Amino acid sequence: MKAKYLIVGLLIIVTSMLILSMPLFAQFEDRFLDSKVHRNGKLWVGVTNFGQFGTDRGRGAVWPGTDEPGREAQYINRGGLFIGGIVPSDETQGPDLHDPGDLDTLVSEGPSAWSVIDFREMFPHFPDERSAIKVRSTIPNSPFFDPNAVSEEDFISVYTDTFLIANGFQFAPAKHQRALGIEVEERSYQFSVSFAQDIVFFDLVIRNIGKNFIRNLFIGFFADNDMGCIGTPEFSQQDDASGFMEVNSTGDTVNTAWVAEPDGDNGCMAGVVGVRVLRPTAREGRVSFNWWMSDTEVSSKDDWGPVTPNVYTGDPNTRDPIGSPEDDPEKYILMSNGSFDEPQFDPVTLEFNPNIPAGATPNDNSRFLISFGPLGTRDSTITDPNDPMAGQTVKIFAPGDSVLFTYAVIGGEGDPDVSRALGTFDPASLIDLGQNAKIAAFMFDNPGVDTDGDGFAGEDLNGDGIIDTGDGVPDFKGPPPPPSPPLTVIPGDGQVVLDWSAADPNSPGYDPNDPNLPLNFEDPFISDDPNTPENESKDFEGFRVLRSKTGNLGTFEVLAEFDLAGNNFGRNTGLAFKYVDHVPNGSEFVYAVVSFDRGAPELGIETLASSPLINATKVLVGPVPSTKLDKRVWVEPNPYIGRSGFEDPNITDQVILENFRELHFVNVPARCTIRIFTVDGDLVQTIIHDDPSTSRAKWNLLSRTNRPIASGIYIFSVETPDGDRQIGRFVVIK
C-alpha cells in the first residue's frame, strides 16, 4: 500500500513539475463535453463536440437491429479526426521563411489513437451549454425544425485544438504541448429516405485561428474498430479486419476504407461499414489508407502494420511505422504517405493476407486511418537554402484561412443466414457498401446540377455525353421519394383505423397544385421526354401501410400495399386511402403510411419510399374512453406473475427487464389520476392519464423513486377531475 501511495505521489510531483516548467498559461474550467447519436436511419452513429466519432461509451457505428432483436452489431467503437501539418519552430515566421531553424510536425487528434500513449486533444470552446451540440431538422412537425436544416437530423458543433496540458488537467495529454491552432465546425447529416439509411455525412469547415503558417495540411479519419455483437459471448476486440475498396462492383471509383468481422459472429456481424472522403476530390490531392494492429506492448509481434510501399519486410527508408504510430511525426507519415495498404482479409477468398508476419495474430485489435492532402489555400516554393524543405513546393494554410473537408460513414448490409452458413461476414455486403458509396457521392454533389447558377453543371470525364461530376457545390440531395400522405390513426375496440383520404384526388377540398400531396409530386431528377404523352417526372406509384413495435427504422413490417392500376409496374391493385388493422386490445404499435415511386435505375435503386418517420403514430389499442368513470376499471394482467404479454419477449435478462415491465389499467376515462398504494397505505406511484384516444393507462412497475417494486398486494384508486373515484386491487408476483 505504501508503494502505491509513493507511485501516486511521484506522478503528482512529476505532472506538477511538467506544468510548472512550461510557459505561464491560464488555467481554464473544464469544457462542456456533449455527445449525441444519429438514429434517423438503419445505421446509428455517435458524434461528439470534441472531434471524436462515437460517444465515450463507444457505439461509433452500430446497427441496432440485427436478425435477432436485442443484439447490437457494433462496427466502429470510436474514431475521429486527425489533422496534421508542418510548422516552423518559431511561429512568428511568415510563409516565406528566412532562417526558420527546425520545423515541427504536429498532429492534433480528436480521439486517442492508442490509449496507452494518447488521449483526446480537441475540445469545445466553452465550459457551459454554449458548446452543446445543436440539433436541426427538416421535418416540419419536429421540435428541432429549422428552415436552414439540411437533413431530417442535423448535428452541429464547434471545437478546437488550442487547449494544452498547461491549461488544466482536463487537457491532459502530455505530448500536446503545442497546438496547430485550428478550429473545426462540424455538421453531420442523416436522411431517412430508403436509399440513404446506411449513410451519415460529416461536413467540416477547418479554420486556422492561430499564428502558424501551416505547410501541407493533411486531414484524416481514424477508426478504432473493436467490432462485435454487443451483449453476446462472441464479442471480442481482437478479431477485426480492415480493407480498402478503390472500385465498386459496377466499376465506379469509390475509394472507401472498410471494416468487417471475418467470422461474422454467428450472423450478427454479416455486414461491413466504410468511410469515404467526398471533399476534396481525388484530383485535388491524394488519398492514403493505412491499417495496423495495436497491442499494449508496442514491441509485440501483434503490434504490426504494412509499410509504404507495400513491402512487408520493412524498408527503413520509408519511415513508415510498423505498427501503432507513437508520436506526431509517425502519425503524419501515415496521413501523407499515399499508401493503399493491402487488406487484412480477402473478401473473395475469405482468407487472411498471406504477407502478415509469422507469429502475428492476423486479425488482432485492428485500426485504420483514411486521410487526404496536402491541403492549403495557395502554393509556395521554399527558396531559402537554410530551410529544411528548401526547393519543395508546399501548400500553405495561413492564419485566417479555411478549408472544407467532407466524408461519409457508410454501411453495407449482409444476409445473416449467408453469414452463418459461411462462418464469415457476407461477402455480398461489400457489393452493397460499394453501391452505397456511389450513392453518397451522388447525394453530396449531384452530377449535372448547376447548384449555384454560374452556368457550370459538371464534367463529362469519358466523352460519352453524360455529365459524370457535380459542379463542386454540395447538394446533399438524392432522387426524392413522393411525400408521405397526411395520416390519421384512430385506435378502437380491437382495431386501428388508418385514414389518408386527404391524399385522394377525389376527396373534398383536394388541391391538385399542392406539391406536398403524393399524386401531385414531380421528381426534379427526372426530365420529361417530349416525345411521350406521359409525364415521366410524376413517378408516384403507390402506398404501403407499415406497422412496428418500436418505431425504429428497419423494424416496420408491411401490412398492405396499394399501387396504381394500368401500368407495367407492381401488382396494379389500384389505390386505397383507408386501412383497418384488427389487433387485440392492449396492443401498442407504431403505424405509418409511406408513398413509393418507380425508383432510380441509374443508381441501382428499384423503388424509393418516403420515410415512415414522417407520419409515424404510436397508439394503444382499446375502446374509445369515456369522459366519466362509468365503467369498472381493472388491471391487466392480474395477478402479474413473472412478466406480462405487453413486454418485449426478447428481453430475457431479469435485471434489464426491471426497467421494461408493463401492466395496464383498463377502462380508464380520458382524463384521470391513478394512484398506487401498498396495503399499508404508502403511496407508491402516481400516473396522470390525459389521452382521449385510449381507455388504457400503462405502468412500468417502478416507484416514485424509480425503483422496482416488490412482490405483493397493491391498492389503486382512479379519480376524475370532477371527483368521481374507484378503488381496486391487484397482485404482483415476480
Image (cartoon, rainbow, N blue to C red):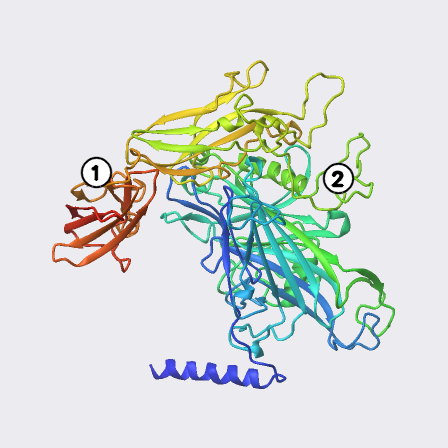
What label sits on residue 702 in the rendered view? none
Secondary element at tag 1? loop
Secondary element at tag 2? loop
Q: Residues within 10 Å of mark 1 (few under 14, many from 20)?
A: few
Residue 84's spot in the image, x, y percent?
67, 63
Residue 10's spot in the image, x, y percent?
46, 84
**Residue furthest out toward the front:** 722
* Residue at left offset 77%, top offset 40%: 450
Compared across the picture, whether 672 is left or right of 341 comes to left
Q: Is residue 24 visible?
A: yes
Residue that numbered label 2 is attached to: 469
In depth, the one of 648 and 626 nearer the eye is 626
In depth, the one of 120 and 99 nearer the eye is 120
Compared across the picture, whether 1 is left or right of 277 comes to left
* Residue at left offset 43%, top offset 41%: 65
Amino acid type at circle 1 is Asp
Residue 275's spot in the image, x, y percent?
60, 48
Q: Is residue 513 above or below residue 226?
A: above
Residue 248 position by quadrant: top right
Q: Residues at badges 1 and 2 in contact (C-beta under 8 Å)?
A: no
Which mark's residue is nearer the viewer, 1 or 2? 1
Residue 86's spot in the image, x, y percent?
72, 67
In depth, the one of 443 and 626 nearer the eye is 626
Q: Is residue 617 above or below residue 679?
A: above
| Real-space CA distance between mark 1 and mark 2, rounded to the nearest whole angstrom | 68 Å
Q: Earlier in the sequence, mark 1 or mark 2?
A: 2
Residue that numbered label 1 is attached to: 630
Amino acid type at circle 2 is Thr
